[in-house]
């Protein structure tokens, strides 16, 4: 069996066309590359024709595709763990199904990482929106001031807590949509926490990495398009999952007092969102933040 340098792991759930486009863009980006790579797709029991599409694609050797069907929705974190465990490459690239790889982006990320792997342990590239504008993906850990600023002061909008740098730099965490690391490091951390279904997985992973001296960097020369929230089914679900993610993260890593303060911040945000919904007669805001308020 030929040696595999890079395993590209994708988790899909009801994103038939989007996943197919992602796979095509990866192979197009790596055309004539010297990197020996495999694409591992873990499908979380889709019911939109994804199973049949992936089965068909995996039969073409030119796709470099290995397809696994979970027959259950494992979520993002457990799905990635499933794929990494079955991968053969020394290096692991986690990439979302709702991405389109541009130019030679994966090669750029891979070669930069392998040349600097003594100091770089996790590396992310620059995410772009569909219109090619920058999508903030280099972020600060969620300390209480950061949570307060994000939820109540729109700090992400102003680039104070989440940004898209134009220079290579060390950061706290990077978007899970596009992360390169060594398989051995991912396994050393036991991968994503299996108790997180969706959202906050990469924050928890890279927080644990930092605690044992592993570094995370952002590399802007490798660029991909990230469509965003393609498999989450609307805006309400992501918001509720973020609330649950914040609470889980604080219960796991912070003191009881910090958790108590976090709960207050979340309640204030939910109340504000609910009241704005009433003022605007916005059913989505009312229903979403009413549900968010009661998350404990």
Image (tube, rainbow, N blue to C red):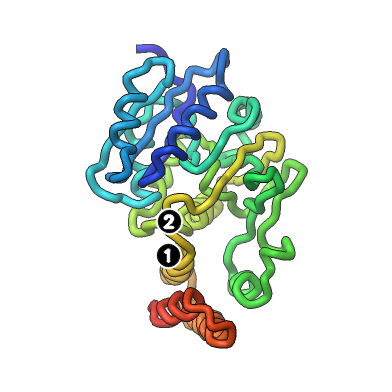
How many C-alpha atoms fall within 10 Å of the one at disc 2: few (<14), some, or many (≥20)? some
Q: Is residue 87 left or right of residue 235?
A: left
Name the residue: 63% across, 31% down: 102
Residue 176 pos. (x, y %): 52, 48
Please tell me whether residue 151 is drawn above or below residue 10 in the rendered image: below
Q: Secondary structure at mark 2?
A: loop
Q: Nearer the viewer, residue 162 or 43?
A: 43
Quarter holding the N terminus?
Answer: top left
Q: Is residue 268 visible?
A: no
How many C-alpha atoms fall within 10 Å of the one at disc 1: few (<14), some, or many (≥20)? some
The image's mark for residue 266 is none
Q: Which residue is label 1 attached to? A: 237
Name the residue: 58% across, 33% down: 101
Q: Secondary structure at mark 1?
A: helix
Q: Nearer the viewer, residue 11 or 59?
A: 59
Q: Is residue 234 visible?
A: yes
Please tell me whether residue 287 is drawn above or below residue 221 in the rendered image: below
Name the residue: 37% across, 34% down: 41
Residue 261 pos. (x, y %): 53, 82
Quarter holding the C terminus?
Answer: bottom left
The mark that comes first in sequence, 1 or 2, is: 2
Q: Are marks 1 and 2 in contact (CB under 8 Å)?
A: yes
The image's mark for residue 232 is 2
């Amino acid at each position: 069996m030929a040696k595999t340098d890079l395993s590209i792991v994708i988790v899909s759930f009801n994103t038939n066309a989007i996943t197919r486009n992602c796979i095509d863009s990866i192979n197009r980006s790596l055309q004539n590359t010297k990197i020996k790579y495999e694409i591992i797709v873990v499908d979380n029991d889709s019911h939109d024709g994804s199973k049949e599409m992936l089965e068909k694609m995996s039969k073409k050797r030119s796709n470099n595709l290995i397809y696994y069907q979970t027959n259950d929705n494992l979520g993002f974190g457990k799905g990635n763990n499933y794929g990494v465990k079955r991968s053969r490459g020394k290096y692991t690239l986690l990439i979302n199904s709702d991405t389109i790889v541009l130019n030679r982006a994966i090669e750029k990320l891979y070669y930069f990482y392998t040349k600097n792997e003594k100091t770089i342990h996790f590396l992310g590239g620059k995410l772009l929106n569909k219109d090619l504008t920058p999508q903030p993906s280099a972020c600060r850990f969620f300390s209480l001031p950061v949570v307060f600023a994000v939820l109540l002061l729109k700090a992400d909008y102003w680039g104070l807590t989440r940004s898209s740098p134009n220079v290579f730099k060390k950061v706290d965490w990077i978007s899970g949509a596009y992360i390169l690391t060594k398989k051995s490091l991912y396994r050393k951390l036991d991968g994503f926490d299996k108790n997180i279904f969706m959202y906050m997985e990469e924050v928890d992973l890279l927080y644990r990495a930092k605690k044992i001296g592993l570094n995370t960097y952002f590399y802007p020369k490798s660029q991909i398009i990230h469509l965003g929230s393609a498999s989450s089914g609307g805006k309400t679900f992501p918001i509720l999952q973020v609330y649950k993610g914040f609470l889980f993260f604080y219960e796991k890593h912070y003191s009881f007092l910090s958790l108590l303060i976090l709960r207050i911040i979340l309640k204030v945000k939910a109340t504000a969102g609910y009241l704005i919904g009433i003022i605007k007669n916005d059913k989505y805001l009312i229903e979403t933040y009413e549900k968010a308020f009661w998350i404990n």
